[in-house]
Amino acid sequence: MLTKKQLNEIKDLQEICENDGGFQLKLNFDLLENRTANYPEDFFHYESGKLVGFLGSYGFGNKIELCGMVHPDYRRRGIFSNLLKIGLEEAKKRNARTILLNAPGASSSANEFLKTISCTFSFAEYQMKWHHTELTEDETITIRPSVTAEDEEAEIQLDILCFGLTKEEACDFAQMIKEISSDQSMIIEANGKTAGKIRVSELNGEAWIFGFSVFPELQGNGIGRKALSKVVKMEQQKGLPIFLEVEAKNAHALRLYESCGFRSYQVQDYYLYKI
């Protein structure tokens, strides 16, 4: 578990790096604040007692994502290379099947560094913010908390069918969310039957939407748009700004979010590391 001092050091370094580069890092503070693993997930580099380099490791089943940063005044000294080497070694010890390196699309320093290592571009993830748009509600769609074993099994199946996870990865991810996350996991029902799922995180005065999916055989019937509209209105009533993430390769999902008032403001690039 990270200490309060470590979390504050990471936040301070993040602010310096983002202000210098004009981008946003995806450091997943909801996960950093709830570390419970008995193996290394976070790697630090200090100079004269000052944190100048950090790398976070985030496991989702057999997939591990790595994201980090180095203080602008301490770059080109091999700090990030060393942090990444340690992070990759730990990922391999955990038998990671897939290792993804995450970097802000607008970070020139990250893009230059990635050209020097064995990785290939995999996909881009758009971060979007909701702008006020008139939304209609449909009483045939309901959103309720995920509470039963049947709900959990539906969530696992949706992660397999819609996000390409293996059964093991989906089960591990569901267990992790249950144990360490304060996110609200909810089931989407259409005409009284389970149709999909959605997860909402309310953290630091913001609402973030994750894991939004509808069973493939039910897609194309407007369920997704109606469910998203309902969740947006719920969060809007709380006075929270609303954000979400979507992979760029899912053009249909991108159009769905845009039709509900979401606009892209940041891009995160993911690179597949060649194990």
Image (cartoon, grey):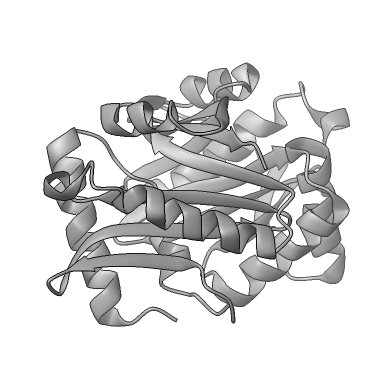
- The image quadrant that residue 94 belongs to is bottom right
- The N terminus - image quarter: bottom left
Residue 166 to residue 119: above or below: below
- The C terminus - image quarter: top right
Residue at point 34%, 27% (across, down) = 112
Query: Picture coordinates of residue 258 (x, y %)?
Result: 47, 21
- The image quadrant that residue 5 belongs to is bottom left
Residue at point 75%, 64% (across, down) = 172
Residue 239 to residue 139: above or below: below
Residue 272 is left or right of residue 242, and the answer is right
Q: For residue 264, say whether it is visible.
A: yes
Residue at point 30%, 26% (across, down) = 106
Query: Picture coordinates of residue 37 (x, y %)?
Result: 58, 77
Residue at point 29%, 40% (across, down) = 24
Residue 240 is left or right of residue 147, and the answer is left
Query: Picture coordinates of residue 25 (x, y %)?
Result: 33, 44
Residue 271 to residue 98: above or below: above
Front residue (pair 46, 7): 46
Residue 155 is left or right of residue 182, and the answer is right
Residue 181 to residue 249: above or below: below
Front residue (pair 255, 96): 96
Q: For residue 133, say whether it is visible.
A: no
